[in-house]
Amino acid sequence: MQHEMRLIDTNGYTVPGAVRYGVPTDQVASVEAELKALAEPDADQGRELHLAHAASLTGVSASNQRAAASQVRANRYEVRITPPVA
């Protein structure tokens, strides 16, 4: 059976470029490792985005953006595996 696999970020969205279609069952573990390797660069980018936005703000708004940046963690990403519908 073939599966669809995708990396999901902390907000529940699919990470761009992190979807694999038609993955055979015997390759699920290796593709999962490949997708998880994409989590850290995506998390880094998310943190940088929040921090850049915080630099243009002041007071509570800036603090909120810095706090949001500290919450972006690669270990909170998940790989969803979906078998195809027959």
Image (cartoon, rainbow, N blue to C red):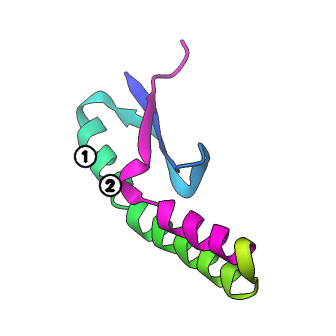
The residue sitting at 41% across, 49% down in the picture is 76
Q: Is residue 27 left or right of residue 84?
A: left
Instruction: Determine whether the residue tagged by mark 2 lies in a helix, strand or loop.
Output: helix
Return the residue at label 1. Answer: 30
**Range of the magenta residues?**
61-86
Q: Is residue 44 left or right of residue 31?
A: right
Q: Is residue 38 left or right of residue 69?
A: left
* Residue lying farthest to the bottom in this orientation: 55
Instruction: Determine whether the residue tagged by mark 1 lies in a helix, strand or loop.
Output: helix
Q: Are marks 2 and 1 in contact (CB under 8 Å)?
A: yes
Return the residue at label 2. Answer: 34
Q: Position of residue 31 (x, y in %)?
A: 32, 46
Q: Quadrant of the N terminus?
A: top left
Q: Quadrant of the C terminus?
A: top right
Q: Position of residue 16 (x, y in %)?
A: 59, 58
Magenta segment includes 18: no
Q: Position of residue 84 (x, y in %)?
A: 51, 22
Location of residue 80 (image quadrant): top left
How crowded is the residue under tag 1: few (<14 C-alpha within 10 Å), some, or many (20+)? few
Q: Is residue 38 visible?
A: yes
In the depicted structure, whether residue 74 falls above or below residue 67: above
In the depicted structure, whether residue 81 falls above or below residue 33: above
The residue sitting at 60% across, 79% down in the picture is 51
The image's mark for residue 70 is none
How crowded is the residue under tag 2: few (<14 C-alpha within 10 Å), some, or many (20+)? few
Magenta segment includes 62: yes
Please name the amino acid that badge 1 sits on.
Answer: Ser
The Cα atoms of the two marked residues, 2 and 1, are separated by 6 Å
